[in-house]
Amino acid sequence: MLKRWALWSTSVRVVALVLFIDTTAVILSVAALWHGPITASDLLRFGLLAVLSVVYLEASRQVELRRRLLVPGDSSHVDVSSVWTVAGAMVLPIGLAASLAALIYLHAWLRSWRHVDGAQSYRGIYSAAAVVLTCIGVSATLHVSDMRLTGLGAVSVVVTAIALFMVLDRGLVGLALAVSGRGTKPTALLGSLADNAFEFATLVLGAVTAASVLYGPWFAVMILPAVFLLQYRALIKQLVAAATIDTKTELLNASAWRVLAQRELERAQRESTPTTVLVIDMDRFKLVNDMYGHLAGDTALKAVAESLADELRGYDAVGRFGGEEFVALLPGVGPRAAANVGERIRQRIASLAVSVEPRTGGTAQVRLTASIGVASANAHASTLDDLLRAADGALYAAKGDGRNAVRVAPVALARAS
């Protein structure tokens, strides 16, 4: 079984990192359990937190199953386990805090995560090891500093625990992403602002749980409704994203783009400012799918989407219209500036060398080009469809001129109904 482990098919750097983190977590946990004093009160608190985590996960499994039905193909998971792990790190001895984290992740893997399509056991083990090391770091810091969750010192304990937990956990996850080559942007390594805000709220709830376990164990049960509300909030956010985001490129899907673009166009008409639409179509993209397979084609589309996100402004509406066609609406941009933007995008795409995994195995470099149609209109443009038709006509003119080109539609055409 170990010979067929998916870890061995990754790079040497990933294998070395995973084995090092996993081994370190095991050694430190065993050493802490062996040498650390454990009282009956510690065992009771450990048991209470373990029971709360089990009750939560079992009760939330049906919610998770419904989410997978509503969001097919999404392998993510709303993880609020840090409510229990940070509480354990704050109130338990080091060894028990590490054991609690390991127990929680083992239960989550057996009952939920392993049933997710595409889930890899080595990733789950690395995540568990990262949280175990994080709990060891937080618990050891609080014990060495003799910081207790009492009186005025409780504030410093909470702040220290939350800050350490976020830094250590994010650091270990970011390290794995960087080594595997899956994370090169700050948002990939450190998480988005929304991700960090959700984690912060979870950790604050964990601090409340820790205080309840210490001073009112029966009140700790009241934490469960709050945890469920936190999960439902994250679930609603995921469902909204699933309804508006194209899963392959993480850009807006066609229907969401039309809604946002129409809103921007109406605003531009009210404010008498120009508006531009770009239609970007990949040249001979069918050859990529035929030669390397559709998974390689999806990788190439994702690379193009990332290039578009880099080249365009944060408030430009960028979406995937279907197949290998992308579309962007640029508020406040006239025809001359739009042509420059289109040319910059064309050059960026032409410079891409996308590493893909062909269906036959190994790796290959894919080169891409795109044809771009640009249509600009002033405040008197009638509808969004007028702009799209004009940009589409300019796109086909670029195709007819040999592809890998940018063509701008006449403003008069963009005004026509």
Image (spheres, rainbow, N blue to C red):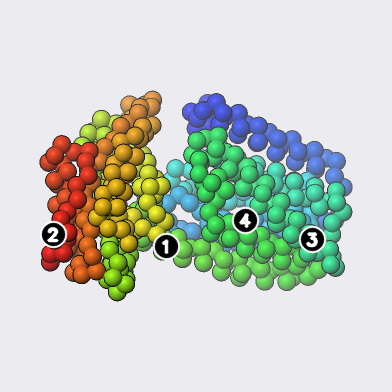
Query: Can I make out residue 55 in this image?
Result: no
What amino acid is found at the position of numbered circle 4 in the picture?
Ser
Instruction: Give the residue number, with chain letter if any, for mark 4.
Output: 81
Mark 4 or 2, nearer chain start? 4
Dots 2 and 3: beta carbons under 8 Å? Answer: no
Determine the CA span between mark 1 and mark 4.
21 Å
Mark 4: give few (<14), some (14-19) or many (20+) Cα within 10 Å: many
What amino acid is found at the position of numbered circle 2 in the picture?
Leu
Pinpoint residue 154: horizontal percent, then vertical percent: 80, 64
Instruction: Give the residue number, with chain letter if any, for mark 1.
Output: 239
From the viewer's perspective, is 251 left or right of 123? left
Instruction: Give the residue number, with chain letter if any, for mark 2.
Output: 413
What amino acid is found at the position of numbered circle 1 in the picture?
Leu
Determine the CA span between mark 1 and mark 3.
37 Å
Quadrant of residue 149 in the image? bottom right
Query: Can I make out residue 107 in this image?
Result: yes
Determine the CA span between mark 4 and mark 3.
23 Å
Q: Which mark is residue 287?
A: none
Instruction: Give the residue number, with chain letter if any, for mark 3.
Output: 156
Determine the CA span between mark 2 and mark 3.
65 Å
